[in-house]
Amino acid sequence: MNGMPLVLIFALVLASLNLPHAASASDSVPQLTAESIRECELGRAAQQRAARVAHFERSQALAERAIELNERSARAHFALFCTLGEQLRVDGENLTSLFGFRRMMKELDRALELEPGNLDALSAKATFLVRLPSLLGGDQEQGERLLEMIIRRDPKSVNARLSLAKSYCSRGNHQPAIVLASEALQLAQADQRTDFILEAQAALAQMRARQAH
């Protein structure tokens, strides 16, 4: 497990979007956060690098604005975590920015500190546990238990299923992994989540290929 490539640890590309610094009458933390998450989803679904980067930069600026207005918004911190992670993997899964990784994890930890029961944040934390080496805090068994708990509490969780499926596959448990990934794909298709559909399809193809060998 510790030999697996790190996930979400990639080159950090940040840029200012020139959003107004002063609060405007239309500023709303929930609205800014929702827009940030939406931009992140659009970035995940975009095919061209320039479009992906533009969406992620916009998402980051919106999340940072929401945090500026309310530092205790767990959802805003989670939105920033998401977009920082996606920016790190724009150009592939390589460890090139330890600073970027630490900043991303700081946002995730802050989101969980403010809202310990947030299933999205817990799912992200569990994903790191199963995929990071122990040197960086990984613990595959603990992560799998947490992912299994999340699926029980949220039967429609796509991310938890994909993360658990990938962890199972890494240990050679291909059939349970394929079942979970298939369920994730069906859920993503039902919700029309293009970003997760593409990820689930790619994961399924890889798992079936590994099972065949």
Image (tube, rainbow, N blue to C red):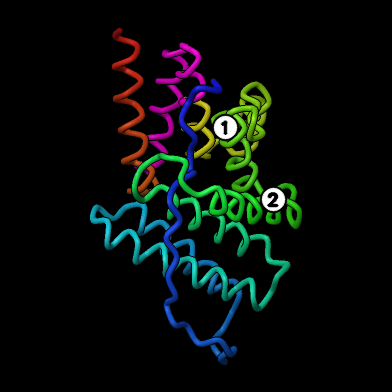
- Taking the view exactly as shown, the residue that stands out farthest to the top is 213
Q: Residue 3: x and y, percent?
A: 50, 22
Q: Which residues are magenta?
A: 166-190
Q: Residue 32: x and y, percent?
A: 53, 73
Q: Is residue 153 magenta?
A: no
Query: 99 or 115: nearer the eye?
Result: 99
**Label of residue 132 in the image:** 1
Tell me the residue at 56%/55% (across/down). 81
Tell me the residue at 46%/66% (across/down). 59
Q: Is residue 83 above or below residue 92?
A: below
Bin the neighbour count of mark 1 within 10 Å (Cα to Cα): few under 14, some 14-19, many 20 and up.
many
Q: Could you tell me if the residues under marks 2 and 1 are in contact, i.e. CB atoms within 8 Å?
A: no
Q: Main secondary structure of the magenta part?
A: helix
Residue 206 shows up from this direction: yes
Q: Is residue 148 above or below residue 53?
A: above
Seen in the image, is 133 located left or right of residue 49? right
Seen in the image, is 174 located left or right of residue 76? left
Q: Which amino acid type is marked by label 2?
A: Asp
The C terminus is located in which quarter?
A: top left
Q: Which amino acid type is marked by label 1?
A: Leu
Tell me the residue at 37%/64% (across/down). 55
Residue 192 shows up from this direction: no
Q: Is residue 176 magenta?
A: yes
**What kind of element bears circle 2?**
helix
